[in-house]
Amino acid sequence: QSSTSGASPMLARSSFDGTPISLPTHTKLALCATWGMALEDKIAHTEDVGSWHTQLIMTFLRVADWWLNIKEPKREGSLAKFVAHKTFEMICGVVIIANALFIIHTTNYDMEFLKEDLVFEHLLVEIVFLTLYTLEVVLKVWVHSWYFFVNEDMSWNILDGSLVVIGMYDLASQVVVQGAGGAAGVDFL
């Protein structure tokens, strides 16, 4: 059982009952882009369907197929409408641009006054930006629930969530370093 063209579904034997399973084209393309055509050939031509590595690969492929086919139900309610509205996206965009401009300002300030401590006003503005980013992620998680991690914006959502966590860590470390009198600072840079 081999696939004859790039558009045909990948066929393999299920490791549980031996029946052929067919993976949709988008799953095949996603997997082949990652691991190349060798994975398809290995599974399609394998004689040892009962081996642990074949079972592991087949389980992974089934989970990947399930993951890629999850569909988020339509969200309703005033909060869902607000989060999905262009105004919310524009507000988030303005916050991102303002934060970028603030980062440029603080970087220039830090280079000009290299040996001075962190300016308290800069710390307050960073807290405001982090609060706004956290609010954005919390609202999206509240609306989308666990679909936040599997919907069409999954990549952006995971990036946003990761940046919020990193921002919280960075802010906490700045506060700790300032509380310690700057002893743990990176003056050598």
Image (cartoon, grey):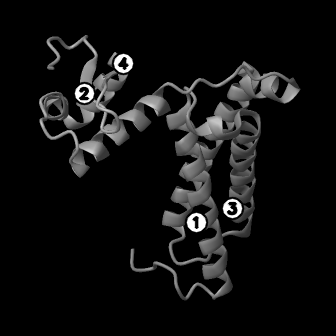
Left/right of residue 21 with respect to residue 51 in the rendered view: right
Which residue is denoted by mark 1 in the rendering? 170
Q: Earlier in the sequence, mark 1 or mark 3?
A: 3
Disc nearest the viewer among 1 and 2: 2
Choose top left, top right, bottom left or bottom right for residue 183.
bottom right
Q: Is residue 78 left or right of residue 74?
A: right
**Residue depicted at x 25% and y 22%:** 11
What label sits on residue 179 in the rendered view? none
For image coordinates 17% across by 27% down, the residue present is: 44
Point out the frontmost of discs 1 and 3: 1
Classify 10 Å Cα crowding around label 1: few (below 14), some (14-19), many (20 and above). Answer: few
Q: Are marks 4 and 1 in contact (CB under 8 Å)?
A: no
> Which callout, 2 or 3, points to the residue nearer the camera?
2
* Dot placed on the residue nearer the N-terminal end, 2 or 4: 2
Look at mark 2 in the image and give the residue it sits on. Answer: 12
Expressed as whole percent of the image width and height from the top left, the position of residue 33 reads 25, 30
Circle 3 Cα neighbour tier, 10 Å, few/some/many (<14 / 14–19 / ≥20): some
Mark 3 sits on what residue? 122
Label 2 element class:
strand
C-alpha distance separating marks 4 and 3: 51 Å
Instruction: Give the residue type at disc 1.
Output: Asp
Across and down, in percent, residue 117 comes to 61, 77
Find disc 4 in the rendering and name its residue.
Answer: 24
Say whether residue 97 is visible: no
Residue found at x 75% / y 28%: 83
**Lower position in the chain sequence, tag 1 or tag 2:** 2
The C terminus - image quarter = bottom left
Residue type of the residue flagged with mark 2:
Ala
